[in-house]
Image: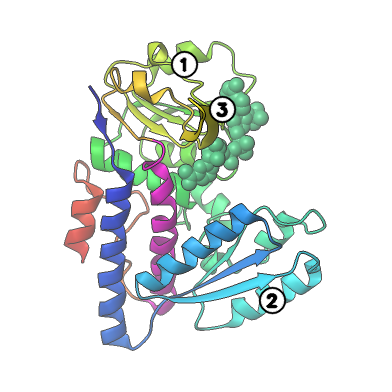
């Protein structure tokens, strides 16, 4: 029976740590980190995400700056707003909620954010820094996955890691981070042949596809650490339920550890956004970073313990 990795509790610990750090910084330096969120349009799911991000920002004592722009906002207007926020000293992190309306070029917009304020880690400079093993702003979802893996496994060195999915926001950066932690990494996608055989060899399995319960327990290596990023809405027994990309009910009998859906990776994503905002603030202010996430955590030490020590 697998250890169930409780992302909700982990995220709550991480937020407490951030809250304490922000309070200390405020007392010592009279300043607090600020996060700007930009939403263009009225997509209901995006509205929920942005509201939740803003709420958690203020809960940890940071300043939240909300920009809700109407769907007709032009690319030029959005770029102008970003230029203003880049120049604003009270703002240390900028998040543009995706997806953007079709008439706006998302790549152009993301790359217009000052890379030091790019708390989503999507700017091409941060992508390049991560890829070349330099200190980057790390994308929130894979960062949360790494924290949970390190906490559970300690050192990841030498493990066979399989990442299923190769999106720019989850799969690719996840693979880079696992590689930076000395795993032997395989990336699978829709054209991968013999996916079951790849899964069977994986000590660490991260699945970010968006297909309900596509990984059955029979494929999973006994004792593997399984991180299920997928969020899928399905109807079962006349009810709408959220399920992951892994068949959790049977996989937990085989895996060594597994994240549930909901309550696994999801809560960690926003907590890591706050963590990145704190990191961005410290870098801008020339303060010591809360903890060096540039893959130099002491091996075998859980991230939560490490964070507590750093506070
Ligand atoms: P994308 O749709 O951008 O990427 C999905 C990836 O899955 C693609 O690389 C695709 O391959 C691959 N894929 C599709 N079908 C298969 C298959 N049959 N076998 C192997 N690979 C396949 O999704 P995201 O990365 O944005 O998100 C993935 C999931 O994670 C979604 O359910 C999303 O909701 C969830 N998510 C959860 C977050 C959280 O905070 N918990 C945050 C972000 C995402 P190809 O490139 O060849 O098309």
Q: Nearer the viewer, mark 3 or mark 2?
A: 3
Check disc 1 and report the residue beneath it.
198
Callout 3 secondary element: loop
Decide whether residue 283 is among the magenta residues. Answer: yes
Image coordinates of residue 299 in percent, x first then y, are 22, 43
Q: Earlier in the sequence, mark 1 or mark 3?
A: 1
User: In the rendered image, which quarter is residue 293 located in?
Assistant: bottom left
Callout 1 secondary element: helix
Q: Earlier in the sequence, mark 2 or mark 1?
A: 2
Give the distance between the C-alpha atoms of the residues marked 3 and 2, in whole angstroms.
36 Å
Of the pair 212 and 310, the residue shown nearer to us = 212
Q: Would residue 133 be seen by someone viewing this image from the given angle?
A: no
Q: Going 42% across and 76% down the picture, which residue do you hit?
A: 33
Please report contact status of discs 2 and 1: CB closer than 8 Å, yes or no.
no
* Position above or below: 230 against 53: above
Q: Residues within 10 Å of mark 3 (few under 14, many from 20)?
A: some
Classify the position of the C terminus by image quarter: bottom left
Check disc 3 and report the residue beneath it.
211
The image's colour scheme reads: rainbow
Q: Is mark 3 within 8 Å of ligand 1?
A: yes
**The magenta stretch spans which residues?**
261-286
Q: Give the image quadrant in which the ligand numbered 1 is located.
A: top right
- The numbered mark at residue 81 is 2
Count how many numbered circles sit on residues in the image.
3
Give the distance between the C-alpha atoms of the residues marked 2 and 1, in whole angstroms.
46 Å
User: In the rendered image, which quarter is residue 167 located in?
Assistant: top right
Q: Going 48% across and 68% down the picture, which residue do you hit?
A: 54
Decide whether residue 220 is among the magenta residues. Answer: no
Q: Residues within 10 Å of mark 1 (few under 14, many from 20)?
A: many
Q: Nearer the viewer, mark 2 or mark 1?
A: 2
* Position above or below: 34 against 153: below
């Amino acid at each position: 029976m697998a250890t169930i990795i409780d992302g909700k509790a982990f995220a709550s610990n991480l937020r407490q740590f951030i809250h304490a750090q922000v309070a200390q910084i405020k007392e010592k330096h009279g300043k607090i980190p600020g996060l700007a969120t930009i939403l263009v349009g009225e997509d209901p799911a995006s509205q929920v995400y942005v509201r939740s991000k803003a709420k958690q920002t203020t809960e940890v004592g940071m300043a939240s700056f909300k920009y809700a722009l109407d769907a007709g906002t032009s690319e030029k207007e959005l770029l102008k707003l970003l230029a203003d926020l880049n120049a604003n000293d009270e703002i240390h992190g900028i998040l543009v909620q995706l997806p953007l309306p079709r008439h706006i070029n998302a790549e152009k917009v993301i790359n217009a954010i000052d890379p030091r304020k790019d708390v989503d880690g999507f700017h091409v400079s941060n992508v390049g820094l991560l890829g070349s093993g330099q200190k980057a702003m790390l994308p929130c979802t894979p960062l949360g996955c790494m924290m949970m893996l390190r906490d559970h496994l300690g050192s990841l060195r030498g493990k066979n890691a399989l990442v299923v999915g190769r999106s720019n926001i989850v799969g690719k950066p996840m693979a880079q981070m696992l590689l930076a932690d000395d795993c032997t990494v395989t990336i699978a996608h829709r054209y991968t042949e013999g996916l079951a055989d790849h899964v069977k060899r994986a000590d660490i399995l991260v699945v970010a596809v968006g297909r309900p319960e596509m990984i059955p327990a029979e494929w999973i290596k006994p004792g593997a650490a399984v991180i299920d990023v997928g969020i899928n809405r399905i109807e079962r027994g006349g009810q709408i339920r959220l399920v992951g990309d892994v068949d959790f009910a049977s996989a937990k009998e085989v895996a060594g550890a597994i994240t549930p859906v909901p309550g696994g990776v999801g809560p960690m994503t926003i907590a890591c956004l706050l963590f990145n905002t704190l990191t961005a603030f410290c870098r801008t202010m020339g303060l010591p970073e809360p903890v060096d996430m540039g893959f130099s955590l002491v091996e075998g030490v859980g991230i939560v313990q490490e964070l507590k020590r750093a506070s």
